[in-house]
Amino acid sequence: MSKLKKGIYKYYMFFLCIIGIIGSGLFLLIGYWSAGAMDSDSAKGFFREFGNVLKKPFANHYNTYTPIVMGISFIAFEIIYFLVLFILIPALKQSKNNDAEEEIEEVFVRIKDDTIMDETVEISEDSKISFAKETNCFDELLFRELFSLGYTFEQITEMSKLRNYMENVSVDMLVKIFDVTMPAADICMYIKSFYD
């Protein structure tokens, strides 16, 4: 997933947390006012009394019903909020995973002299592994693990050159050697200095 999409996802999650906090406070306030309307001896009805309470929202409306009604209001909001999150969060995660899948499938084909073609190639499900072998890249599983850790295609392509010098290359080994912030050019220089 691109940095922009990751940023949007983080802001969206932050926005949902803020909604949860503000919603909880608002429902507690509504519960407080509702309890104030319930304490009246007037036979005007709940909604008229609630309107009267709202005319003086900052007056002291505390009574024996207040803790109970505020508690019920808070629990009601939390149930609604978590039900909405239960629906939204998996949808957001699925969207995030789909974006990552699309980025993996849109790759730049490297030519032997390490120049990059200008065209983007769509890789079908059947040809992903064969493409990885032809370009001396890692297998699909290793590629996906590295990509999910934040490595770019260019970094992974440079790391794949280790296959020329050693057979067994694992994700743990690569993560220890090459930091995710290390540019692809530095990875290339590192491999050349140690193995060439």
Image (tube, rainbow, N blue to C red):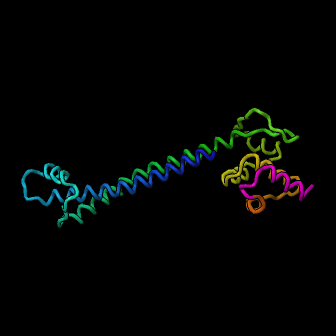
Looking at the image, residue 49 sits to the left or right of residue 185; the answer is left
Q: Which residues are magenta?
A: 179-196
- For image coordinates 29% across by 59% down, the residue present is 28
Residue 130 x/y as whole percent: 78, 42
- For image coordinates 84% across by 56% down, the residue present is 190
Residue 177: quarter of image:
bottom right
Residue 77: quarter of image:
bottom left
Q: Magenta stretch: dominant SS?
A: helix
Residue 151 x/y as whole percent: 71, 51
Looking at the image, which is closer to me, 162 or 42? 42
- For image coordinates 15% across by 51% down, the residue present is 52
Looking at the image, residue 44 sits to the left or right of residue 115; the answer is left
Spot the residue most to the top: 119
Residue 22 x/y as whole percent: 37, 55
Q: Is residue 140 magenta?
A: no
Looking at the image, residue 134 sits to the left or right of residue 83; the answer is right
Q: Is residue 195 magenta?
A: yes
Q: Quadrant of the C terminus?
A: bottom right
Residue 113 x/y as whole percent: 88, 40
How many numbered marks are there? 0
Looking at the image, residue 50 sits to the left or right of residue 10; the answer is left
